[in-house]
Image (cartoon, grey):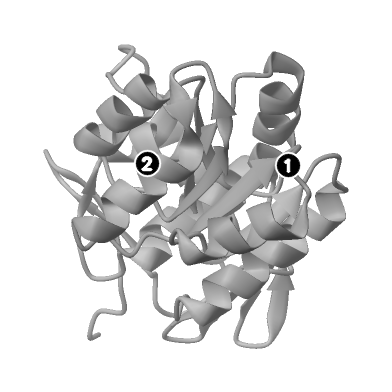
Amino acid sequence: MRILVIEDERKIAGFLRRGLTEEGHQVHVEEDLAGARRALAQGDYDLLLVDRALPDGDGLDLIRELRRSGAATPAICLTARDRVGERVEGLHGGADDYLPKPFSFEELLARIAAVSRRAGRSERVEVADLLIDLAAHRVERAGREIHLTAKEFALLRALAESAGRVLSRTRLLERVWDVGHDPGTNVVDVAVSALRAKVDRGFARPLIHTVRGVGYVLEERPR
């Protein structure tokens, strides 16, 4: 998922970035409401992790703004405010869940999974005979398990979640490497080549295709 973390405590923000990135998510961090609003205006996110006590206001106000605008992006409040009344306020304010600090990373992952399920986000993606279990980080093709690195998994996930649609190299750089510009390297092409060697080699039909001059697409094509 593309996750926006809004947290001004640098140690917590760094911990969340590292942990969630290792889980295969793309993480962007902002430390205040102003930065969060800019990030939301510039791109779409699948989940918000929002601290309430931010330098320029209450993170819950941002969630209220999004709900008033019709945005249904799932949001989890992370806060040191652990009184029952404040948790209830957060949930009534539009948050999908409320996790008091300090919290365990495993509990956070469980809350994220639960919120994603309630939002209707599938934890399994299937394209032809390729199965991707997002929660277990497991990939199979025709019943054969395929072992991928974290970056290869993130790349396959990006292609699979846009199956049938061409993703440009720039778009892949943004989604998988969190780079908003082309650094002038062939990092995407090298990564796709490595992924193809694992996903397509040995199977009758390739699923990862090059669209010359544009990018890559994951889809089943007729013989």
Can residue 123 be seen in the rendering of this structure? no
Counting from the top left corner in percent of width and height, residue 67 is at: 30, 59
- Check the picture and name the quadrant holding the C terminus: bottom left
Q: Tell how many labels.
A: 2
* Residue type highlighted by circle 2: Leu
For the question of whether residue 192 can be seen, the reply is yes
**Label 2: few (<14), some (14–19) or many (≥20) C-alpha neighbours in 10 Å:** some
- Closer to the camera in the image, 193 or 53: 53
Q: From this viewpoint, which residue is outermost toward the front?
A: 85
Q: Residue at x 39, y 42 (%)?
A: 61
Mark 1 is on which residue type? Arg
- Would residue 177 be found to the left or right of residue 220 on screen? right
x, y percent for residue 139: 65, 70
Residue 170, image quadrant = top left
> Would you name the residue on which mark 1 appears?
81
Q: Residue at x 60, y 87 (%)?
A: 142
| 47 horizontally vs 99: left or right | left
Which residue corresponds to mark 2?
62
Viewer-side label of 2, 1: 1
